[in-house]
Amino acid sequence: MAVSAAFENESLSEKVKRTIVDRVVDGTYPPGMRLVELQLAKEFGVSQAPVREALRELSSTRLVENIPRRGTFVRSASQDDLAEVYFVRLALEGTAAAAAYPALHADPAPLREALAGMREAAATNDAHGIAKYSTDFHRAVVVATGNRLMLEIWDSLYVEARTMATVVRGHVDLHAAAEAHVPILEAFESGTPDLCTKLVTEHQHEYSILPQE
Amino acid sequence: MAVSAAFENESLSEKVKRTIVDRVVDGTYPPGMRLVELQLAKEFGVSQAPVREALRELSSTRLVENIPRRGTFVRSASQDDLAEVYFVRLALEGTAAAAAYPALHADPAPLREALAGMREAAATNDAHGIAKYSTDFHRAVVVATGNRLMLEIWDSLYVEARTMATVVRGHVDLHAAAEAHVPILEAFESGTPDLCTKLVTEHQHEYSILPQE
DNA sequence: CCAAAAGAAATTATCGATAATCGCTTGTGA
DNA sequence: TCACAAGCGATTATCGATAATTTCTTTTGG
């Protein structure tokens, strides 16, 4: 068998999609690699159609790049690309923070839980865990705005995958990464909307230069 | 013949896509309408594949909604949806404005040209023209950041189509709409980055409540 | 007369095959 | 030797047909 089998009643193209995402994230399909539709189809034991559909969808989320009549390639997350992602995150999360203030001020549980997760992960030196919970933390801010469109766009940035790559490869101090979120949580608990925007923006900025070290 | 014939060497699915966009925007396919793949294929004189591909792509840009195994429907641009779009524009353009300042301060030509276009359109009572050039104006700010990712996301918001719908249907004063952009242009010419952000944000906010009248 | 079930019609998802196009290799003439 | 064109293999784009599912209609039993 080829594609992962979980989620029985999802469509073939969705299974294929998940499989491709996994392989791009774990490096099986390295950046720049050409993904040939019929080749993947054969590999997964399906026809061209679902593979093509999966690739097109991943193209719209920018995990791969599709060039008409030429092919599909795994996006190489170049330094420039990463910088662009961070800048968009800065725009989205910064604006989201102020809008999310009322909801998160009333109930900061999502942030607290994510922070707890990060601390536990840091304690066990679990880089993947840090990536996951850090993503949860930032995502929670966007979720709290109630803006589904913004959340969709934010999700399409593949923050978790990128964070994972950064944390796993990089020499990031896990404890420091976790604690860096504390001021943001405190701002939501006892600060102002503007302060939240400011801290989120600064936090983002810090990380945006981290990978260049 | 069915699909528009311009752009000779674009793919069938792209032609189909443009045709569907046009018909959604001009109301031929009203909100909520179900778009049946084989039906459209017959109408356009193509097979199911390019239609399906076009619909999937439009789904990723939220112009239509795809429900697995159930079909594709024209999104009803509800008040909530529009508000979400405006909020995201606010986030993107507001942040973009400050980053675009150096480039547009050095050369504000794109903004000036768009403004000139708007004025001419207003003079001839051309609502479509206003929509187009207003879009150009705001897009120029995002372009000037040099961030391709942000531009892609901005484009996916279908600002022009929405502006068109608002202006054409609504009772918008075209002259006022054009002149509303002057302070922004002036801020880029002789103001500060922060002022640009402020004005763009306010401008956005004004428009965000316009459609509710 | 109504609710659930069976059957029919419509539509999406997938397949296998073919047409159109691209990039590379090979051959040609200056 | 090199620019360029023809030919070739690989791959994407599109087609027409079929399988799988959903939705609509009709039937059945209470």
Image (spheres, coloured by chain):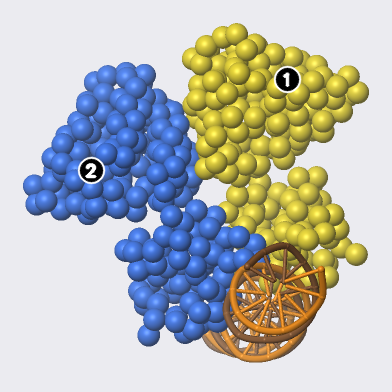
Chain colours: A blue, B yellow, C orange, D brown
Q: Amino acid at mark 1?
A: Arg
Tell me the number on the disc at residue B101: none
> Furthest-left residue in view?
A123
The local secondary structure at tag 1 comes to helix
The local secondary structure at tag 2 comes to helix
Identify the residue shown where x is 72% and y is 27%.
Answer: B134
Residue B78: x percent and y percent?
63, 40
Location of residue A68 (image quadrant) = bottom right
> Furthest-top residue in view?
B190
Please, which chain is the residue tagged with disc 2 on?
A
Whole-number angstrom distance, CA of label 1 to CA of label 2: 47 Å
Please, which chain is the residue tagged with disc 1 on?
B
Identify the residue shown where x is 23% and y is 43%.
Answer: A114
Residues B73 and B123: in front is B123
Eyeballing the image, is B82 above or below B100? below
Other-residue count near label 1 (Cα within 10 Å), few / some / many at <14 / 14–19 / ≥20: some
Marks 1 & 2 on one chain: no
Residues A18 and B84: in front is A18
On screen, residue B199 versus residue A20, left or right, reads: right
**In the rendered image, which quarter contains the N terminus of chain A?**
bottom left
Residue B175 can be seen, yes or no:
yes
Residue at which label 2 appears? A114
On screen, residue A118 versus residue A98, left or right, reads: left
On screen, residue A54 versus residue B63, left or right, reads: left
Identify the residue shown where x is 39% and y is 25%.
Answer: A98
Q: Tell me whether the residue at label 1 lies in contact with that at label 2, contact meaning CB atoms closer than 8 angstroms.
A: no
Residues A75 and A159: in front is A75
Residue A134: x percent and y percent?
26, 43
Identify the residue shown where x is 23% and y is 48%.
Answer: A170
Q: Amino acid at mark 2?
A: Ala
Eyeballing the image, is B90 above or below A62? above
Residue at which label 1 appears? B112
